[in-house]
Image: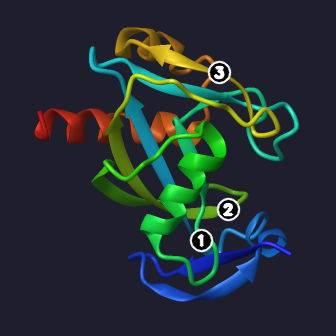
Amino acid sequence: MEMFQLVDAGGRPLGSAERSSCHGNPALIHAVVHLHVLDRSGRLYLQRRSLSKDTNPGRWDTSVGGHVAAGEPVADALAREAQEELGIDAAGARPLFTYLYRNRFESEYAHCFALVYDGPFWTDTVEIAEGRFFTFAEVDAMKGTGTLTPMFEHELPMLRQALAAHA
């Protein structure tokens, strides 16, 4: 049974709940981590979610995204998810921003990070159908077409702003 870290609207830990309780109940806010991987030329690595995923199958999403387990520090969740999904070490990732995202299905409090890394990647084919680097112009052309996850589309302006502030 997979247990998620529940948080309040400000990201403060509140307890835990099963995955099945969180997915389908937007009243339960659970913590997630997102890692945005950029190469040295500034392109953004995106993953296309496996068709077997229960949410947004086949859509392009953040480089790494995953749930924070009950009682797990955010840094540990980031390291675990980066290793599981792409086979990379996220130790050099820098924090960018946090935000609360709600939809009819769930509520997630996202901890977002960035890492400059050119590869190689090892992708978990159960989680990820494919992955590759995109220019921001290519990502912009995908907005509104249904090929990106709604949460990633929501996060994209915040990512751009954070990257510009850290440039």
What residue did someone put label 2 on?
106
From what the image shows, is residue 36 above or below residue 43?
A: below
| Real-space CA distance between mark 1 and mark 2, rounded to the nearest whole angstrom | 8 Å
Q: Is any atom of residue 102 visible in this view?
A: no
Of labels 3 and 2, earlier in sequence is: 2
Asked whether the beta carbons under mark 1 and mark 2 sit within 8 Å of each other, the answer is: yes
Instruction: Identify whether 56 is placed above or below 118.
Output: below
Residue beneath the point at 49% across and 85% down:
13
Q: How many numbered badges does the structure rendering display?
A: 3
Instruction: Tell me which label, 1 or 3, sits earlier in the chain.
Output: 1
- Secondary structure of residue under mark 1: strand
The crowding category of the residue bearing disc 3, from other C-alpha atoms within 10 Å (few below 14, some 14 to 19, many at least 20), is some
Q: Quadrant of the N terminus?
A: bottom right
Residue 35, given in percent of the width and then of the height, sits at: 45, 45
Q: Which residue is mark 3?
A: 147
Q: Amino acid at mark 2?
A: Glu
What residue would you read off at disc 1?
30
Number of the label disc, if any, that sits on residue 42:
none
Query: Do residues under tags 3 and 2 come within 8 Å of each other at their CB atoms?
Result: no
Q: Position of residue 162 (x, y in %)?
A: 22, 42
